[in-house]
Amino acid sequence: MTHAPSSTTTHPAHPRTDTVKAAVAAAVTILLWASAFVGIRAIGDVLSPAPLALLRLAVAAATLTVLILVSSRRLPSVPRTRRAWSLIAAYGVLWLCCYTVALNAAEHHLDAGTAALLVNIAPLLVTCGAGLFLGEGFPRPVLIGAVVGMSGIVIIGMGTETRGDWIGVGLCVLAAVLYATGVLVQKKALASVDATTITWLGCLIATVVLLPWTPQLVTEVAAAPAPAVLGAVYLGVFPTAIGFSTWAYALKRTDAGKLSVSTYAVPAIAVLLSWVLLSEIPTAYGLVGGAVCLAGVALSRYRPRRRRAETPAP
């Protein structure tokens, strides 16, 4: 496909369409990731952190393999350079594998709401990292949105009863760092691979890394109630296979810092989902903080209208 270099009428429409699609993909991701916090809490202590991560990622890898084969009848083209493979491997190990295990372990020490709040320092880390290492700079709307969103997180936290210890806090901070690093690495990798492929390969690599916990997984699944196993399968199919694919699609078309700020909506939605699904009534702090988080997301995505550039006379 070629593009006429002098075209001025059709070029603006394509970026706008991509922007809308990326926004929809980001919205799907946010909803699914918020449900993951509720899902992990619902499963409780039935599955240990590493076995739960193994089951979740194995289900995600299998789901993506089936979807790829059904949709295209062939496997996607894989990257050919060592650098691309290194970035994909780092993304799979750091984010999909280590982050998932760290978050699962953290929720053995902290309640899901507190864990979600602590992990959501990651968007601020991504915003800073993208400005420093990806050349995205520090746009004023993104910085303002990040600060407002972080303020909403603090407000929600004021109404959260922290039941846990410093081990849980440390694990959440570790998860946030792994999350932020994974986003930055993934953004670089997406320059040479598509969204579905990077998610699929990342899940496969993460699953392989966690294979040593297979015997423990088999033992725990045999003793686990069916709802817990189905909950783990849900985590694999929806928040992981679908959620990370839609995230990668949006990330390929959006600045990492700007997109990450939108995930400040995750704790706000998680509070509402916990209310509906787990009958956990949110506090006034939770409702106000959730509104502030959403306001931060809106501010980060604000773009003032630009005057149409004058076309010079031929």
Image (tube, helix red, strand yellow):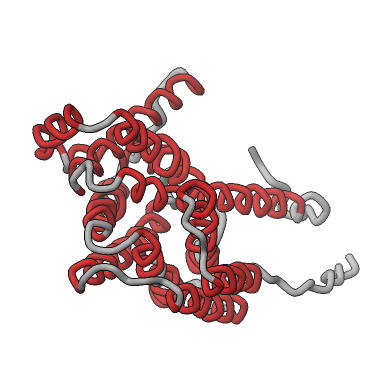
Nearer the observer, 62 or 194 = 62
Where is residue 219 shown, x and y percent of the image?
12, 31
Where is residue 272 shown, x and y percent of the image?
54, 56
In the shown orientation, is residue 208 left or right of residue 21? left
Residue sitting at the far right = 313
Question: Which residue corresponds to the image point at 66% horizontal and 42% vertical from the top-left?
Answer: 2
Nearer the observer, 147 or 128 = 147
Question: Which residue corresponds to the image point at 64% horizontal and 73% vertical from the top-left?
Answer: 299
Question: Which residue corresponds to the image point at 64% horizontal and 47% vertical from the top-left?
Answer: 21
Where is residue 142 shown, x and y percent of the image?
57, 75
- Whether residue 164 is visible to the viewer of this picture, yes or no, is yes
Against 203, residue 305 (above or below) is below
In the picture, the quarter occupied by the N terminus is: top right
In the picture, the quarter occupied by the C terminus is: bottom right
Question: Which residue corresponds to the image point at 40% horizontal and 36% vertical from the top-left?
Answer: 234
- Whether residue 259 is visible to the viewer of this picture, yes or no, is no
Where is residue 112 shown, x and y percent of the image?
36, 59
In the shown orientation, is residue 309 left or right of residue 117? right
Where residue 171 sits, quadrant-wise, is bottom left
In the shown orientation, is residue 292 left or right of residue 191? right
Nearer the observer, 133 or 244 = 244
